[in-house]
C-alpha cells in the first residue's frame, strides 16, 4: 500500500510540473493580456512599453518560465497582477469558501442520493422509481446558472426567505478564524454569525448539489439493481436471513463501490471550484477567482495557481478514492 | 417574518450541529458595542469589482477611486453635481501671467485622519513624492500623473517625456507655490483628479508608501496602499475584508467640512450585474451603479431612485484614414450624413442620452454651438459618395461585443444600427466583432486593421485637452491620422494658450475645424450613466465625473 501511495505521489508531481509548463506557456500565448486590462482606454504605446518591461513580459517565454519555477520551489506563487496581493493569500481566502460550499453540497447530494437511489431500486418500476428517474433527468439536464437564477428569483426576490448572494450579511461583525464562516461562528460562540452563514449557504449548496445528487441517485439505483440480481443475495434470502442484514451487509456494501467512485469524482469537481454557482451567488471561492482572473484582466499568477491547485485536488481525491476501495471491499487490491 | 423564522430554524440547526468541545475554543474579536447586524447609520453601496489598492497615485480605475475619494481630498474639486471646478483643500488659487507658477491658498484647520496637520509642506511633500518616484513598477502605475506631468525626475522608460514639474515651495503653512516649466491647459481641472489626492506625509513615510516591488509578473504595494491609507476626507478607512468582499469606511469625526451623516459606509463588492440588482431589490444594498439602460425604467417603476448623471462622455464612430478611400473628406462626411443618430439615441440610448455634435460635452470649455452639423440625410450621403467616386465602398467595422462601457452600454446593438444606416446609402459593411481584451483594442489601437470602429471616453477632468486633445492631439493608429500636422498644431496651440478667453476661442475653433475640415471620426452621443439608490436614501448627488461623495448621504 505504501509503495502504491509513493508511486502515485511521484506520478502526481510529474503531472503537476508538466501541467505548470503547459498552463504557463498557454496563458501567455493567448491574445490580449494584463497590459490591456490594466491600462484600459488609457493605453498608449509608451505606457504599454513601460508596463511590459515592468512586468517582465519583454523577456523570452522560457526565461519567464524559469523564473516562475525558481520562485515556485520556494513556495512563492507571485502576486496578483490586479491587487498586488500574494497569490497564496488570495487562494488561502478563497479555498475555505469553496470547501464550505462543496461540503454542504456533498452532504445534500450523498445524504439524499444514496437513500433515494436505493429506494428507487428496491421499488423498481413503481411510482417512486419513475419519479426519481424523471427528477434526476431534470437534475442532470438543467443548466446550473439557470437553476441558480431561478432559485434566487423565487426565494430571494418575491419571498425573501434567503439572501440573494454572498456568504454572510453585509456589515455583520463576525470573527474569522478558519475562513469557514459556519464553523467560525461555532468556534467563537458567535452563533448568530454561524446561523447567518448557514442561511447564506443553503441556496448555493442546493444549486450546486443538483448534478451530483442526480448522478448519485442514478448510479446507486443501477448498482443496487445489479447486486439485487446477484446469486449471493438470492442465496441469503433463501437461507432466511433477515432483510435488514441482507440490505446492509450484502446489497448496500457491494453496491457502494461505483457510488464511491462517483462521489470521489464529484468531490474533485466541486472542490476544484464551482464556477457557475459561485458566480451566480457572488461566492468568493476558487470558482469566482477563476472567472475574475480571466475576465478581470488575465491575472496570470492567480489563474495558473488556481488551475494547479484544482489539478492537485482532483488527483489527491482520486488517490483517496482508490485507496478507499480496499476498505469498502477487501477483495479489491490497489495496484 | 418568514426569513426571520427560517433564520431561527437555521440557528437551531447550527446549534444542534455544534460540537460542545469545539465550541468556544477560539476567541471572538467582535466589537461588543456594535451588535451583530448592520445599524441604521450604515450606507451599503454595491461596487462592481475589486479595488486595486488605496494609494491614489497608483490608481486610475473607477472601483479604487470610488473608495479613495471618500478618504482623501484634492486641492481643487468640483461643485457637487457639476464638472465646474471649485476650491477643495485649496480655498483659492491663481497662476502668474506665464501660467507656470500656481499659488494655492490652503484651507486652514484641516487635519489628516492620523491627527497630523494639513499644510503647504504636506502638499509639497506629495508633489515631490510623485515627481521623484523611482522604479519602473511604480512609474508604470502612475497613469494620471504621467498624463498630466509627463515624466519623472528620472524616467525609467526611455520613451517617457520630460516632466513639466519643476518645484513646489511652502511659502507659509497656508500657501503652496507650484512651479512648472511650461504652461499646461489641463490645469486647474487636472488638480481635481482623484489620483492627485493629498495624503498624509507621516503615514506615507511610516507605511513605506513608495515601495512598489515587482514580484514575478506582478507588483506588490505597500502597507500604506493596502491597509493604512490616510487622507483628509470625510471617512477613514476601516478595512477591506476580502473574504466577505466588504470595504468599510468610518465617519471621520474631525472632518473640516460637512461631516458624514452615516456612521459607516460599506462598499459591498458584487461583480455580477444581475446579482447587484437582486441585492438592491432584496434591500441588502442601498445603491448600485451603471444599471443597463434596459433596466432603468423597470427599476424606477419599482420605486427605486434612478439618478442620471449629467453626461460627461462621448461615443464616436472612428474612421481610419489609412484606407485611401477614407482619406477623402467627402466620404467621411457621407458617413456622417448616413447615420440616423437621433433614432439611435431614441432606440438604443440610455435615458437622457443626446446626439453629440462634437467630441466634448457642452459643459467643457471650448464647446462651439456653431460647428458643422450632420443631420441625417441619406440623399446627401449618396451624393457625396458619388462625387468622391466611392459608390462601391466596402468597409470593415470593428466593435467589441463583450463589454459595456458607460458611454457604450450595448456595443453589438449600436454597431448593428450604424451598419444598417451605412448599408442604406450603399456602403457595404463587414461587421467584425472582436473581444475587447485580446482583439479589439490591439487591432484598433495598435495595428489599425479597421476602417470603422466604435469607441468612446469618459472625462477625467473638465478641460478640452482631456477629450479632444486625448483623441486627436497627436498621431494615432486608431484614426490613421499620422500626417495631420495641421490638426496636431492647432490642438497644441489651444492647449498652450494661457489667457482664458483666448483659450476658449482657440478650442472653439479646433472644434469647428474638427467637424468641418478634419472629421477623423463622427461623434455619436453623450450618454448619462445612472446611479440607483433605494427610496430611503437621501442626499446623494450624482456627479458627471462619476465622483460621488457619500458624506452627504442619509439612510432611512
Image: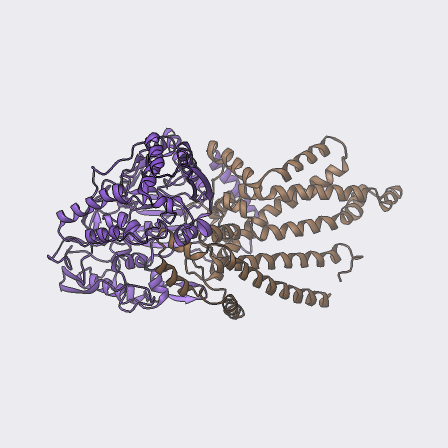
Chain colours: A brown, B purple
Residue B350, visible in the rendered structure: no
Which residue reaches farthest top? B301
Number of numbered discs: 0
Q: Is residue A313 left or right of residue B25?
A: right
Quadrant, the C terminus of chain B: top left
Residue A78: tell me if it is visible: yes
B443 or A290, which lies in front?
B443
Q: Residue at x 27, y 65 (%)?
A: B152
Q: Is residue B510 left or right of residue B248?
A: left
The image shows residue B408 at horizontal and vertical percentages of 38, 41
The part of the image, by quadrant, that contains residue B215 is bottom left
- Which of A137 and B538 lies nearest the eye of the viewer? A137
Viewed as shown, does residue B119 lie left or right of A190? Answer: left
Residue A287 higher or lower than A7, as above or below: above
Residue B55 percent coordinates (x, y): 32, 58
Q: Could you tell me which residue is drawn at 35 percent across and 60 percent down? A: A46
B432 horizontally vs B288: left or right: right
At a point 64% along the width and 44% down the height, the residue shown is A212
**Residue B423: percent from left, percent from top:** 42, 34
Q: Position of residue B29 (x, y in %)?
A: 41, 56
Residue in front for this viewpoint, A120 or A296:
A296
Amino acid at each position: 500500500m505504501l509503495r502504491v501511495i509513493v508511486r502515485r505521489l511521484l506520478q502526481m508531481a510529474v503531472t503537476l510540473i508538466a501541467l505548470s509548463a503547459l498552463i504557463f506557456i498557454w496563458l501567455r500565448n493567448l491574445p490580449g493580456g494584463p497590459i490591456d486590462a490594466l491600462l484600459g482606454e488609457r493605453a498608449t504605446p509608451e505606457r504599454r512599453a513601460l508596463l511590459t518591461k515592468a512586468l517582465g513580459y519583454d523577456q523570452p517565454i522560457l526565461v519567464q518560465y524559469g523564473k516562475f519555477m525558481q520562485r515556485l520551489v520556494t513556495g512563492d506563487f507571485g502576486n496578483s497582477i490586479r491587487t498586488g496581493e500574494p497569490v497564496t493569500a488570495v487562494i488561502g481566502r478563497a479555498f475555505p469558501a469553496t470547501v464550505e460550499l462543496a461540503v454542504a453540497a456533498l452532504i445534500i447530494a450523498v445524504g439524499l442520493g444514496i437513500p433515494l437511489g436505493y429506494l428507487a431500486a428496491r421499488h423498481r418500476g413503481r411510482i417512486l422509481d419513475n419519479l426519481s428517474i424523471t427528477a434526476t433527468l431534470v437534475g442532470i439536464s438543467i443548466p446550473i446558472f439557470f437553476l441558480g437564477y431561478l432559485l434566487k428569483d423565487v426565494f430571494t426576490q418575491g419571498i425573501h426567505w434567503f439572501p440573494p448572494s454572498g456568504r454572510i450579511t453585509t456589515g455583520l461583525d463576525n470573527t474569522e478564524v478558519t475562513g469557514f464562516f459556519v464553523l467560525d461562528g461555532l468556534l467563537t460562540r458567535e452563533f448568530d454569525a454561524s446561523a447567518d452563514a448557514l442561511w447564506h449557504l443553503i441556496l448555493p449548496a442546493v444549486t450546486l448539489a443538483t448534478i451530483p445528487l442526480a448522478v448519485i441517485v442514478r448510479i446507486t439505483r443501477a448498482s443496487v439493481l445489479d447486486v439485487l440480481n446477484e446469486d449471493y443475495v438470492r442465496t441469503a434470502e433463501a437461507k432466511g436471513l433477515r432483510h435488514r442484514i441482507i440490505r446492509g451487509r450484502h446489497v448496500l456494501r457491494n453496491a457502494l463501490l461505483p457510488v464511491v467512485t462517483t462521489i470521489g469524482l464529484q468531490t474533485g469537481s466541486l472542490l476544484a471550484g464551482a464556477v457557475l454557482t459561485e458566480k451566480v451567488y457572488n461566492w468568493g471561492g476558487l470558482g469566482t477567482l477563476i472567472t475574475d482572473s480571466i475576465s478581470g484582466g488575465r491575472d496570470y499568477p492567480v489563474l495558473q495557481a488556481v488551475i494547479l491547485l484544482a489539478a492537485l485536488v482532483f488527483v489527491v481525491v482520486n488517490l483517496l478514492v482508490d485507496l478507499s476501495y480496499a476498505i469498502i471491499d477487501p477483495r479489491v487490491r490497489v495496484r | 417574518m418568514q426569513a426571520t423564522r427560517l433564520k431561527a430554524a437555521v440557528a437551531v440547526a447550527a446549534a444542534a450541529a455544534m460540537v460542545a468541545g469545539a465550541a468556544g475554543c477560539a476567541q471572538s474579536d467582535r466589537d461588543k458595542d456594535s451588535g451583530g447586524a448592520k445599524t441604521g447609520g450604515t450606507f451599503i453601496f454595491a461596487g462592481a469589482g475589486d479595488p486595486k489598492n488605496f494609494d491614489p497615485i497608483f490608481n486610475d480605475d473607477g472601483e479604487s477611486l470610488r473608495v479613495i475619494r471618500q478618504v482623501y481630498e484634492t486641492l481643487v474639486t468640483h461643485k457637487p453635481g457639476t464638472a465646474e471646478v471649485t476650491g477643495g483643500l485649496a480655498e483659492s488659487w491663481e497662476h502668474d501671467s506665464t501660467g507656470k507658477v500656481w499659488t494655492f491658498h490652503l484651507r486652514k484647520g484641516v487635519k489628516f485622519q492620523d491627527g497630523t496637520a494639513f499644510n503647504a509642506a504636506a502638499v509639497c511633500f506629495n508633489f515631490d513624492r510623485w515627481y521623484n518616484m523611482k522604479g519602473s513598477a511604480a512609474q508604470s502605475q502612475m497613469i494620471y500623473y504621467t498624463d498630466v506631468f509627463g515624466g519623472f525626475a528620472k524616467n525609467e522608460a526611455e520613451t517617457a517625456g520630460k516632466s513639466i514639474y519643476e518645484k513646489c515651495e511652502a511659502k507659509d503653512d497656508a500657501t503652496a507655490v507650484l512651479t512648472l516649466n511650461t504652461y499646461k491647459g489641463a490645469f486647474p481641472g487636472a488638480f481635481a483628479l482623484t489620483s492627485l489626492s493629498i495624503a498624509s506625509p507621516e503615514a506615507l513615510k511610516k507605511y513605506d508608501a513608495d515601495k512598489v516591488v515587482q514580484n514575478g509578473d506582478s507588483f506588490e504595494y505597500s502597507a500604506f496602499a493596502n491597509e493604512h491609507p490616510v487622507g483628509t476626507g470625510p471617512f477613514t478607512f476601516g478595512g477591506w475584508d476580502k473574504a466577505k468582499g466588504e470595504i468599510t469606511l468610518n465617519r471621520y469625526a474631525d472632518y473640516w467640512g460637512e461631516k458624514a451623516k452615516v456612521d459607516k459606509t460599506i462598499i459591498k463588492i458584487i461583480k455580477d450585474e444581475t446579482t447587484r440588482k437582486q441585492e438592491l431589490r432584496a434591500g441588502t444594498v442601498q445603491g448600485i451603479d451603471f444599471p443597463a439602460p434596459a433596466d432603468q425604467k423597470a427599476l424606477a417603476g419599482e420605486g427605486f431612485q434612478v439618478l442620471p448623471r449629467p453626461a460627461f462622455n462621448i461615443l464616436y464612430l472612428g474612421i481610419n484614414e489609412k484606407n485611401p478611400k477614407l482619406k477623402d473628406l467627402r466620404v467621411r462626411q457621407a458617413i456622417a450624413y448616413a447615420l440616423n443618430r437621433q433614432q439611435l439615441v431614441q432606440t438604443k440610448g440610455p435615458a437622457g442620452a443626446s446626439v453629440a455634435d462634437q467630441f466634448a460635452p457642452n459643459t467643457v470649455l471650448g464647446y462651439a454651438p456653431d460647428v458643422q452639423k450632420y443631420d441625417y440625410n441619406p440623399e446627401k450621403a449618396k451624393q457625396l459618395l458619388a462625387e468622391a467616386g466611392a459608390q462601391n465602398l466596402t468597409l470593415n467595422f470593428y466593435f467589441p461585443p463583450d463589454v459595456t462601457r458607460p458611454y457604450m452600454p450595448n456595443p453589438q446593438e449600436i454597431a448593428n444600427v450604424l451598419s444598417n444606416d451605412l448599408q442604406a446609402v450603399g456602403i457595404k459593411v463587414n461587421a467584425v466583432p472582436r473581444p475587447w481584451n485580446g482583439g479589439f483594442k490591439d487591432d484598433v489601437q495598435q495595428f489599425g486593421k479597421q476602417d470603422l470602429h466604435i469607441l468612446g471616453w469618459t472625462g477625467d477632468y473638465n478641460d478640452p485637452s482631456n477629450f479632444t486633445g486625448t483623441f486627436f492631439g497627436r498621431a494615432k493608429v486608431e484614426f490613421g491620422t499620422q500626417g495631420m500636422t495641421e490638426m496636431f498644431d492647432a490642438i497644441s496651440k489651444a492647449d498652450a494658450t494661457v489667457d482664458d478667453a483666448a483659450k476658449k476661442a482657440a478650442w472653439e475653433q479646433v472644434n469647428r475645424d474638427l467637424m468641418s475640415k478634419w472629421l477623423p471620426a463622427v461623434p455619436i452621443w453623450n450618454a448619462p450613466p445612472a446611479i440607483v439608490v433605494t427610496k430611503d436614501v437621501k442626499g446623494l448627488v450624482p456627479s458627471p465625473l462619476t465622483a460621488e461623495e457619500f458624506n452627504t448621504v442619509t439612510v432611512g
